[in-house]
Amino acid sequence: MRIYLIDGYSLLYRAFYALPQSISTSGGLPTNALYGFTSMVLKLLDTEEPVGIGVVWDGGMPEYRTEIFPEYKANRSAMPEELRMQLDHLDEILSAMNIHSVRVEGFEADDVIATLSKKVPEGVELEIVTGDQDAMQLVEGAVKVARTTRGVSELKEYTRETVIEEYGVTPEQIPDYKGLVGDSSDNIPGVRGIGPKGASKLLQEFGSVEEIYANLDAVKAKGTKSKLEEGRESAFLSKELATMRYDVPVEFDAEGLKFEGVSPAVDEVVRRYEFRSLGQRLSELPTVGGERLAPPERLKVSVSEEPVDLSFEAVAVAPVGDGRWCVAETPTDVRLVEELPNRPLRVHDAKKNRVRDANFDTYLAAYLIRPGLGSYEVEAMAEDRGLAGVDVEHADERVAAAAQRAAVVQALSPKLHEELEELGLARLYYDVELPLADVLADLEDIGMPVDADTLAEVGKEVDGRLATLEAEIHRMAGRPFNIGSPKQLGEVLFEEMGIPPVRKTKTGYSTDAKVLNQLELQGHEIARLIVEWRELAKLKGTYVEGLGKLIGPDGRIHTTLNQTTTTTGRISSDTPNLQNIPIRTETGQRIRDAFTSSPGRKLLVVDYSQIELRILAHMTGEPTLVAAFRNGEDIHTRTAAEVFDIRPESVTPELRRRAKMVNFGVLYGISGFGLATRLGLDRVNPAEADEYIRRYFESYPKVTEFIEETFREARERAEREGSVPYVTTLFGRRRYVPELVDRKKNVQKLGERFAFNARVQGTAADIMKVAMIDLAPRVKSLGADMIMQVHDELVFDVDEEAVRTVAELAAERMVAAYDLDPPLEVEAKVGERWGRGEPLALAR
């Protein structure tokens, strides 16, 4: 009869650090430790088939050890918050698996296990599962140790012979071994300078710490003898700390530890914690205590080419790829058609599949429920929610795959709808994200007109400037070299030119942007030229050459607008990324010049004026900010007056520039050093920049309160709901911020920047989306097309005679997208080229 005792915290910590912390439920609860722990227990049950199994937990720090050595385990950091959050759920999992937990108040798990090991009934074999060396002292006869050697996936069994072979001492000598060697994990000091080999040799010769010191004169090596003499007190203390106790008030309950099967509740555990890959393994274990949930039967889907039944409320669709569609009327009944039925449609990724007016999109729903996952495969989402797999018999593999997807979408849609309702995201989903997919599809289809000749001219200009820069850099270096090679650049700068290196990496000298900026501030002109060369080379490859290859037969570039790639809700652009063309450089402006209006039309650009600062004023209710915007003041001048304690009319352009950096820096949680770098370290040092930030918060106390409240609410919400911390926009969009409870302070600070920025920037993104949905059909009827969205601006291709009408309409609807206090404001420019529009006065 074999029984396993698991050292609970030892295995739990192993699982936490062995598995990626990105493993979590769709609701955001981290589960890497829960998953790893459960997986290891399952492995024991599967491969070892023990009669009994139990988990032993610490019941607190033992007083007797801290009394003799207050520093005992003092070097251990507090349990990471991400792990603590999981610990609260482990009892539920073990209870569902019918696995007994043992905890004795005031005693460590080691001592509980040690005591139990001495009370093993005759005929019982005990296997102790742990990651600690200490347990080796318990190996004796029927007691063995299985130690985790690689994460939680592999165990090595230790018998008396194995202990002697690995440590060079017997199990009984392990406390003596620790007394000499020490144990950094428990802060046991040992004897300074005595290592594992030396300790083994001494114990083989003398037998114990006591005998070593009783025969110290017999120690031949003078150095070893000297170390032992100096460490006498520490050796005896360390042995005492490492010696497990056998007097814990606990009895070995073999009957209570017996494992006869899991409880029916284990099915709910699998679903709640989304242990998809463990579900099958758990289903193979015996069950006691009632009927388990019947595993969902795999759906048997039949595919026919009969007409679609119009009696069903909504159907799911998936493209076959050759002009045909699979239409799921129920999760088991699929029709193959060439035209989509004129009825409510469910689909996975409506924009990509160009399904207009979908009434449900499982892809967008999954993104809103859990932003930031990156992948939203419909089959995985279905498995996570306990939905059955799908079997389709069809000779055409494309039809079978499409039928399977349509069937899963049909079954999954109601479940995702319920989750959206539960999380308070339904309105954002149905009113914003779902209709936006059609708007973005239109923008992608229309595209932006491009002048290839202008692109070619910009290419020649860039080539000429790159050649000039290269020649000057080579002249300063004293020889030609590959400027694009970090290795060669490092050798030239720091070895041949003798510039003191700023930072070295494993591969050599660092020449990243931070290093070059620092060298530039030190007065090294070559660094400034290299920075410019890099920026131009990147622009050339990404835009000048890259854009030319992407011009379609219609003379337009059709970017992809992504709705599900950012955690804040912002729309992103790729292939090509038209949102990242720099606007503050001449080359960037020239690249924008290549984007033109259609013949007989003008490009109209309407953008929100300081939308994020207005949202900040609204959210915080900071009176000074609100009043400044309401009164039409320049907000950066107002901030300069507050921060520098001067009258607004005394604010110089330089002070306004600094205040502007402070205003936007606060939104992104910028540090004093970061602000000083942006302002120019030659003008403002970090201490001075810190003072600017301090004065900002002193001048706007409601902003400080709002920021602190944001962090506090996110952490309290996580505690209350058993999830990771999250913040919400004014529209209810969630942004999960696990960094807020990270054990590292610098990561927590990063999380605080994410949290604050997500509330403001996410709200701005939501407002823009509302405006786009409202405007797209309206401008179409006026002879205009919305053709691009870039953060806070919308670009329209407008009939010349309709420019004024469209501009006024855009301004009206963009301002009406959300009732902010202070109100939203927009600005407009019009011209034939994207980069050269003239301001257009709008009616107030």
Image: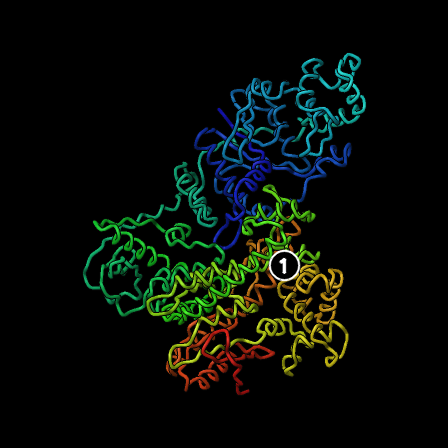
Q: Nearer the viewer, residue 731 or 199?
A: 199
Residue 104 relative to residue 831: left or right: right
Report if residue 435 is visible in the image.
no
Camera-side residue: 270 or 320? 320
Residue in view at x 49 percent, y 40 percent: 38
* Residue hosting label 1: 528
- Kindly identify the amino acid type of the residue bearing the numbered disc 1: Arg
Q: How many marks?
A: 1
Colour basis: rainbow
To which quarter of the image does residue 167 belong?
top right
Question: Mark 1, residues whose alpha carbon is within 10 Å: few (<14), some, or many (≥20)?
Answer: some
Q: Position of residue 468 (x, y in %)?
A: 56, 60
Say which quarter of the image contains residue 760. Answer: bottom right
Kind of element beneath mark 1 = helix
In the visual, does 490 lie left or right of 71?
left
Q: Is residue 40 left or right of residue 201?
A: left
Residue 786 drawn above or below residue 255: below
Q: Is residue 10 left or right of residue 381?
A: right
Q: Quadrant of the C terminus?
A: bottom right
Which of the two residues, 603 or 769, is positioned nearer the viewer here?
A: 603
Q: Which residue sits at x=46%, y=86%?
A: 804
- Residue 314 lies, in percent from the top left, at 31, 65
Residue 787 makes an appearance in the image? yes
Residue 322 placement (x, y as % from top left): 24, 59
Give residue 49's position: percent from left, percent from top: 45, 29
Is 303 situated above or below 587? above
